[in-house]
Amino acid sequence: MANFNLYIEQLDYNPIIDLIKENGEQHILKKREYFVRQHETSRYVAWVKRGVFHYTCIGDDGCEHIVGYSFENEFVCDYSSLVKRGQSLVNIIALTDCTIYVLPYKDLLEYYENDIDAQRFGRLAAEALFEMIYKRLLDFYCDTPEQRYVKLMKRCPDLKSIVPLKNIASFLNVTPETVSHIRRKLLQK
C-alpha cells in the first residue's frame, strides 16, 4: 500500500531492513493471528514481506477502534511499548495471511548503540514517525470526516480494495454509514 504510513518515504530504511532480514527470523502469521496483544509488553520489531496488519485498541466501553495499519514493505511494531518497555496500548492483528521478518528489539538497540550513524538514524526515524502521528492528530481536530476520507483516498486509492468499509470508518473514527454517505456525496459531485 503506497503512501499509507508516510514515515517510510522520509528515510532510506534499507540498513534496518537488512539487519532485520539477516539477524531476525521469518514468521508466518495466519489471518486474525496476533503479533502484539494489548496490555502485554512488546519485544519485537518486524518487517512485513507480505500481508496487512491492523492496529486496534479496545476502549473502556469494550468497543474496538482501528488506529493504524502496516502493509507490505513497512515495519510492524508497537513503538511506544518497545521504547518505554511498558504495556502495549494496542493489538496488532494480521488482517491477511502475513510473512514477516522478526527481530528482538534488544538487537535493534545494540545496533543503534554500536554506531553513531545508526544512533542518528534511529533519532531521525523516531522524528519521522512523530511527524506522521502529529499530522494525523491535527487532521482529527481540524478536518471534517469528509476531508479526512478524501485525504486518505487520495493518498491510498487502493485501500478500499484491501480494507473493508467498516474498518476504514473505524480508522477515520466515524460510522460505516458516514463513510457510505461521504462516498455517495462525492459520486454526485
Image: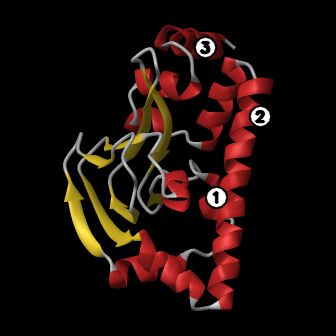
Vertical placement of 92 versus 100: above or below? Answer: above
Mark 1 surroundings: few (<14), some (14-19) or many (≥20) residues within 10 A: some
Label 3: which secondary element: helix
Residue at mark 3:
182
Which amino acid type is shown beneath numbered disc 1? Tyr
Vertical placement of 15 versus 188: above or below? Answer: below
Number of numbered discs overlaid on the protein picture = 3
3 and 2 marks in contact (CB < 8 Å): no
Residue 17 appears anywhere in the view: no
Residue 24: x and y, percent? 32, 77
User: Nearer the viewer's eye, disc 3 or disc 2?
Assistant: 2
Residue 25 appears anywhere in the view: yes
Which amino acid type is shown beneath numbered disc 2? Leu
* Rendered residue at 39%/38% (across/down): 162
Residue 180: x and y, percent? 51, 12
Q: Earlier in the sequence, mark 3 or mark 1?
A: 1
Q: Which mark is residue 28?
A: none
User: Is 172 situated left or right of 121 in this image?
Assistant: left
* Rendered residue at 62%/84% (across/down): 118
Instruction: Report the Cα–Cα distance between label 3 and label 1.
Output: 27 Å
User: Nearer the viewer's eye, disc 3 or disc 1?
Assistant: 1
Q: Nearer the viewer, residue 40 or 151?
A: 40
Instruction: Report the Cα–Cα distance between label 1 and label 2.
Output: 16 Å
Q: Which mark is residue 7?
A: 1
Residue 151: x and y, percent? 68, 34
Vertical placement of 62 versus 45: above or below? Answer: above
Residue at mark 2:
138
* Rendered residue at 36%/78% (across/down): 21
Vertical placement of 173 versus 44: above or below? Answer: above
